[in-house]
Image: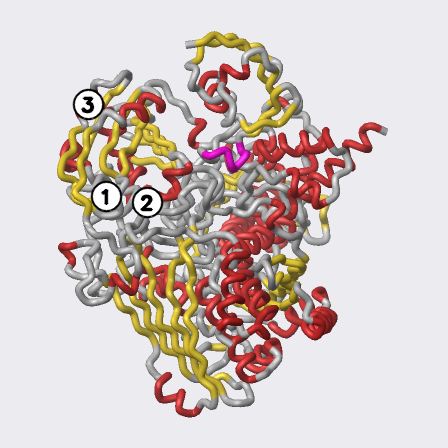
Amino acid sequence: MQHIKVTVDGTTYQKEVEPRTLLVHFLREDLGRVGTVVGCDTSNCGACTVLVDGVSLKSCSMLAVQADGSEITTIQGVSDGNDWHPVQSAFKECHGLQCGYCTPGMVISSIDLLNENPNPTEAEIREGLEGNLCRCTGYHNIVKSVQRAAELMEGAKS
Amino acid sequence: MTDVVDAGTALGRPIKRKEDARLLHGQTNWTDNIQLPGTVHMAILRSPLAHAKITHLDVSGALAMPNVVAAFGAAELGELNSSVPCVWPVTDDMVAPDFPALAKDTVHHVGDCVAVVLATDAVSAADALEAMSVDYEPLQAVVNMESAISPGSTLVHEDKGTNTCYVYNLGGGYDEKVKEADVVIKRRFINQRLIPAFMEPRSVVAAPMGMSDEITMWTSTQIPHILRLLIALVTGIPENNLRVIAPDVGGGFGGKLQIYREEILVAQLARKLGRPVKWTETRSEDMVATHHGRDQIQDIEIAAKSDGTLVGLKVDLKANMGAYLQIITPGIPLLGMFMYPGIYKMDAYDFQCTGVFTNTTPTDAYRGAGRPESTYAIERIMDELAAELGMEPMELRRKNWIKHEEFPYTTIAGLTYDTGNYELATARALELFDYEGLRAEQKSRRDSGDRVQLGIGISTFTEMCGLAPSRTLGALKYVAGGWEHCTVRVLPTGKVEVITGTSPHGQGHETAWSQIASSILGVPVEDIEVVHSDTGRAPYGMDTYGSRSLAVGGQAIKEASERLVEKARVIAAHQIECSPEDLEYVDGVFQVKGDPEKSQPLGAVAFEAFTAHNLPDGVEPTLSAEATIDPQDFSYPHGTHLAAMEVDTETGKVTVRKYVCVDDVGVQVNPMIVEGQVHGGVAQGIAQALYEGANYDEDGQPQNANLSTYLIPSAPDLPSFITDTTCTPSTTNPLGTKGVGEAGAIASTPAIINGIVDAIRHLGVNDVLMPATPMTVWKTIQAAQGGK
């Protein structure tokens, strides 16, 4: 077992973990942060995407011990309680989700995408979300959601 | 973000979904999130071979591993090793092999369950699998359907003496009628095997809890009500002691329309161990253990006059059952059986289907369930016939489809289509598509010998939805009915519960059902709670599949809401001291006609019904009403889908340049949700055409059973879609709705392939196998050119 200290959604945790534990399992099973979900076992689906020190990362592709000292934001931490991040608002407004299972990862990846490129084209959005699979929406409304979020975030700045 | 919606105006508006707040904040209750005290986690030892005798199995090594509580093979499980049910014996002589939850002495496909171990955490359970001792004696595997039904083939189930599950026939007049035809075309289409691959892996928790001897099961299913009945029947757990809850469910697409062996095992082991048992699949397990879809060989023959008038259609199917029969495995091709004639008039139709066992994962419902296969065949062969006749493919369709003034129309397959307007939907689609402009571009690219050729793919489809009239299901030997239930309750505080038997998993029922009830009760949408997917709180239902929830369940909501208003009217009249006939009901308030000052809001009526201090004689306390509706007939959504496909003739690369669809789903409750359903369906249909296909080698080893190798399209792989709708209300239900869950997936696959073939037909190509990968398309072009 190895001792780690991780800040997740504003709370700092100190835990003993098995070195083989994946970050996503640590979040879900050790911390009970079950908003982040597991969709595959090959790092393809992106449902488990979180922000590690501000950068999006599939939490199944990192060991918990590698996250030692990091600050992690999950879908449960992108807005305060029942507040809405512009990306969350845009996904609701544009019907960018149906079953909602890919949504935590899709929202986090979209936040990261817009941080890097505040005014993406449709092609840039599609390429930027390539690592996140959705089976319900055909991505049409996810693309529109990200475009709408860009507008909302631009408006919030001015 | 709460959307306030005016009472009474909710129907037909694109209201934002109630479900989204929890889904967007990570506050969702997926089954795998449920962690009860004392839970033991199940892990499953699965067969690595497609066909083998289990010559030795010793689970005791697992018991010595850390944190392990118990381990079972079939022998240890004994009489708790229940069989998995199939409820659709399609013929009297259908062959149904035994399908025990744990394989007894022989494994029949890769992923077959051999043993289970239970430990206090999931990782320990997985580790302990390694400590089990198992030996197999490999047997010859049968993978190819035509080999399987050849004389002398190895048998999937030795004791059954055959690999033929059943042979089903319909019709019989084709061979006589075909003599009148000028042109006969034969084609073989392959509808390849697909994996549903819903995003939420399956998960199930069962626990002895609650009152008396109750077992509560949480499971990621589309069918909590059917599951409760069947788990009770196969396990012996008394039905009245079993509560099934489908919490938030992350997609299904038919893949969670099932009673899985893992659900049976978890229920039995929770009962045996007297503590909560949990199992969550890995994705790689999912792709061999969750049922697959499609997998049919379609031999199609169509006959026509030289002017294009259809004479008849002959369909000879081979449908892969896989190794076992799951809940409705044998019936899937028969759901397609009625739809091979599509929207066309003809004089003869012969259908035959042979169900075939192979050493592969069982097949069952996948989005469309039989109807995508039939639509693919008819829409593909209409293009082939048009090419043979030298006719414009849309013109051939127009010549043969049922005209809007001919409805209701009884097809050669025996269904009566109630309404439709193919002319209208097609005209709108052609306009949005710029059909003439693209045809002109196609010609100029062809004339100039452009490396990238353009093709136009057409699909004018219909489907049968609203499963289903119970008598029809009975005639098809399906063992249950197709009704749906709703109870509407107004609580003393004026809040409303709509208790439905449907079980959503992404379709937005909480929003749409609120809209239906709101439009009748006059209560704001946000004051209505839709209660679903819990046999304890919503005891009656037939669940969600086959685009049935709105067309059938919606009727029940409407009827129950109207009955509730009538009960409330009697109480309100008593309170106001007038006759019930003197009251009108406006925006949630009963008021005296011509004297609206004398009024009583619904909430006040509900409170009176609760206190019961002053109810009229003969009226029982509480304000609720229920309705159970058996649909009088199916509903028939239709539409015209058009795909502009670019094919690079040198690399085989295919691009969807433009996709237009105009769907007629009848009256819409929430157009935003309808549009989303169309997008997702079209995407899944395109995925079949271009990307997906579950492959086995000749030994029955899956070749791409994980998400690294099975290509689910991601955002760059798909285009944006241009969608629109027309509306000819259905007459088989009072809301005029039809259903939309499967439409896109049924329509889009042939549109895409027709477009590809149209782009390269001048190179000698008349078919492209699915998925039409660059390699497949390139090889197809090379073969056609070499053959010249």
Q: Chain of mark 2?
A: B
Residue kind at label 1, given as amino acid type: Val
Q: CA distance from mark 3 to mark 2?
A: 30 Å
Residue B503 in view, yes or no? no
Query: Disc 1 on helix, strand or loop?
Result: helix
Q: Chain of mark 1?
A: B
Query: Disc 2 on helix, strand or loop?
Result: loop
Part of the protein shown in magenta: A42-47
- In primary-sequence order, the first of circles 3 and 1 is 3
Magenta segment includes B143: no
Task: Please give left or right for residue B174 compared with residue B577 in the image.
Answer: left
Residue kind at label 3, given as amino acid type: Gly
- Magenta span: chief secondary structure: loop
Q: Give neighbour class at mark 2: few <14, some 14-19, many 20+ (Cα, 10 Å).
A: many
Is label 3 in contact with label 1 (beta carbons under 8 Å)? Answer: no
Residue B133 in view, yes or no? yes
Name the residue nearer the viewer: B443 or B22: B443
State the residue position of label 1: B234
State the residue position of label 3: B61
Is label 2 in contact with label 1 (beta carbons under 8 Å)? Answer: yes
Asked if both marks, 3 and 2, belong to the same chain, the answer given is yes
State which quadrant residue A17 falls in.
Answer: top left
Q: CA distance from mark 3 to mark 1?
A: 30 Å
Residue kind at label 2, given as amino acid type: Ile
Decide: is B60 above or below B335. above
Q: Percent position (x, y) of residue B496?
A: 55, 39
**Which residue is at 54% across, 49% downward?**
B561
